[in-house]
Image: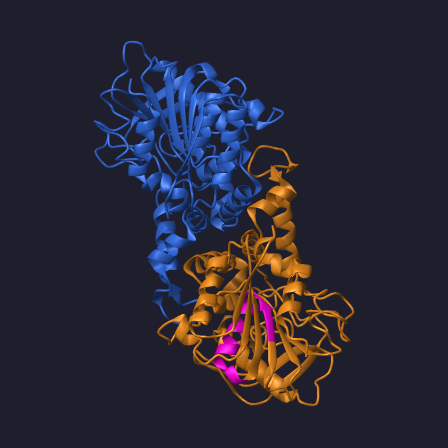
Chain colours: A blue, B orange
Amino acid sequence: MPGHDIPSQAWTWDKPFQLECGGTLPSLRIAFETWGKLDSRGENAVVVLHALSGSSHAFSSDWSSQGGWWEGLIGDGSPLDPRKHFIICSNLLGGCYGTTGPSSMDPGTGAPYAANFPQVTTGDMIEAQRLLLQSLGVQRGLTLIGGSLGGMLALQWATRHPAEVRNSIALVAPGRSGPQAIALRSVQREAILSDPDWNTGDCYTGRFPARGLALARKIGMITYRSADEFEERFKREQRDPRPHFLEGQFEVQSYLDHQGRKFSDRFDPNSYLYFSRAMDLYDLSKDHASLQDAFGALEARVLLLAVNSDFLVRPVEMLEAHEALLNAGKRSRFELLRSVHGHDAFLIELPQIREHLSRFLPDE
Amino acid sequence: MPGHDIPSQAWTWDKPFQLECGGTLPSLRIAFETWGKLDSRGENAVVVLHALSGSSHAFSSDWSSQGGWWEGLIGDGSPLDPRKHFIICSNLLGGCYGTTGPSSMDPGTGAPYAANFPQVTTGDMIEAQRLLLQSLGVQRGLTLIGGSLGGMLALQWATRHPAEVRNSIALVAPGRSGPQAIALRSVQREAILSDPDWNTGDCYTGRFPARGLALARKIGMITYRSADEFEERFKREQRDPRPHFLEGQFEVQSYLDHQGRKFSDRFDPNSYLYFSRAMDLYDLSKDHASLQDAFGALEARVLLLAVNSDFLVRPVEMLEAHEALLNAGKRSRFELLRSVHGHDAFLIELPQIREHLSRFLPDE
């Protein structure tokens, strides 16, 4: 079973956890890692929020010296500095790297929840992390930072719990998911659901929908990158020049195959389905007259980092959030990263991101 | 078995037909429709070239009064006028609407070719149509017009057989397929190939990969439309508001489901695979030092119509062809259609297209 292999701490909440859309989890387990120490005022916490495929391992840590998914963004002298900040990253609720999710045991049946896991939302992911933070003595002055799904969480958290959040930094994340992103994610989910080995989610013992999960990842990868990057990297190079569709292969296909295989070796198809749907459901303007109205109570300073070549979350969608924030009288800053890497630039363009963070984060 | 149900004429070539990448078809059958009459000089022919999912039925005709896929672009007073032009549209080689393709009987086995059909190329599609035109007495002064795959054919034909083509009109078609388009098509093919009911292509008698073909179509549809169009049409409207990924559905998903179902009721998954791969293989600069060099012998006047919101064939890719043509000293005109409909604008923005055709086509 992929996942679960990231060394981390684990924290347990032994009371029922009520979910936003109904359903209750009898308890929670949250895998997390920390860097630095909480200061005496308890106000130097930075919460790093991962994206769909991430884990608590944002950076190398006491638990693993292996590089994390945001390695290079933290360190002495970096805007995220363990000498100054208490940095926390936890695996999100519904995930497959140590936190309660579809692979967890359902005490009612003694078997993994699989597709019987209740649908979690971005709101649930936030509330679960707030419990963890409470246990760590962190309750205010938060700096939140994340990309993609993580960026959605950073914005939603600041909107739901204004008093807790001092800075909210969202990379490649809109104020609500639009129909094209929903469409693109829905076909990825269907690739998994169509795999006979998905087996209604019962993929923890025998059959595993590796092919469906890999196909979902491939579709995803195309939306995370850009046409210009593919042109630069692959052009029309062929891996196998035979003409027939069953035999020939362009280099870009070989790259996607590799990405798909690598991913299906490490990720839980059910976590993918739950996270993907949670992103579709994400809409800060829900239950509000408008996005501007939704931001009404927000207190945090907000930094929105879009990417010029991002096709999945177009800069115009982040500008919509930015304008709603400004119209609501909030402190929002919008910056455009110049990159050929599309959506994934949030994982790649670290010098640019560091620069924006340095300018945005007050030197406390 | 979907396909084959478009009333049309059929023409048969009873000699072997040699394919570009090797392999021979023992004979050819080409389904086609015509509008208007060939003039005495034999130089008023307009060849309409269909896209991946098309057929010979571009317009209502003597064979069927039902509207065609380009209905509204032909007619008395239109730039494509049966009173002036002899208009021909044939189902492309490899297709499923009456022309020889993977569903045809392999005389060697007495069963449909299925995936044993040789890989056809855009070049083969052109040569097959040239035989048909010859039989109709049409050999020069051609006006070629098509969108997407059809536009590729219009450009390649004018490049390969310069003396035959007077006007080449390509909508949403580049000079070569780029790696992102290849990537997007390859995941569509994989959706079909992953369906257990594809059954190595043997889907003419019992099992039929309806789900895989529908998924391929859905992925395709997202690339044929645009984020802005989806935003306008669907916003975040929900068809089924239940939260769980197995139950809830946004309107955009319902739309894609409908498109997928409709398509898998009418199309041959194998034709899809062959056409899709043929589009990947399309590269006018192949065997040339450059695209400019490839256009060296071209004589036709060229009109390139791109769409500002096209994500699959970005305007910049058509500009590349346009500049190569100009640098080769050719008569090329590039126009940008303004549309929210993305790639599919070539099927939708008929008034704009008519206007460009009127300006481009000399009043003979």
Q: Is residue A153 magenta?
A: no
Which of B114/B173 is in front? B173
Residue A49 horizontal/vertical position (percent)? 38, 29
Q: What is the quadrant of the N terminus of chain B in the image? A: bottom right
Residue A317 horizontal/vertical position (percent)? 51, 37
Q: Is residue B297 above or below residue A276?
A: below
Give the extent of the magenta segment: B144-163
Q: Is residue A207 above or below residue B55?
A: above
Q: Which residue: 38% across, 32% down?
A: A50
- Residue A36 located left or right of residue B43: left
Q: Is residue B58 above or below residue B230?
A: below
Q: Which image quadrant for residue B164? A: bottom right
Q: Which residue: 33% across, 29% down?
A: A357
Q: What is the quadrant of the C terminus of chain B in the image? A: bottom right
Give the overall secondary structure of the magenta segment: helix
Residue A101 horizontal/vertical position (percent)? 44, 31
- Residue B26 located left or right of residue A265: right
- Residue B363 located left or right of residue B116: right
Q: Which residue: 39% across, 14% down?
A: A140
Q: Is residue B161 magenta?
A: yes
Q: How many marks are shown on the rendered structure? A: 0
Q: Is residue A280 above or below residue A80?
A: below
Which of B105/B55 is in front? B55
Any part of residue A320 in sight: yes
Residue A76 horizontal/vertical position (percent)? 21, 27
Any part of residue A13 in sight: no
Q: Which image quadrant for residue B234? A: top right
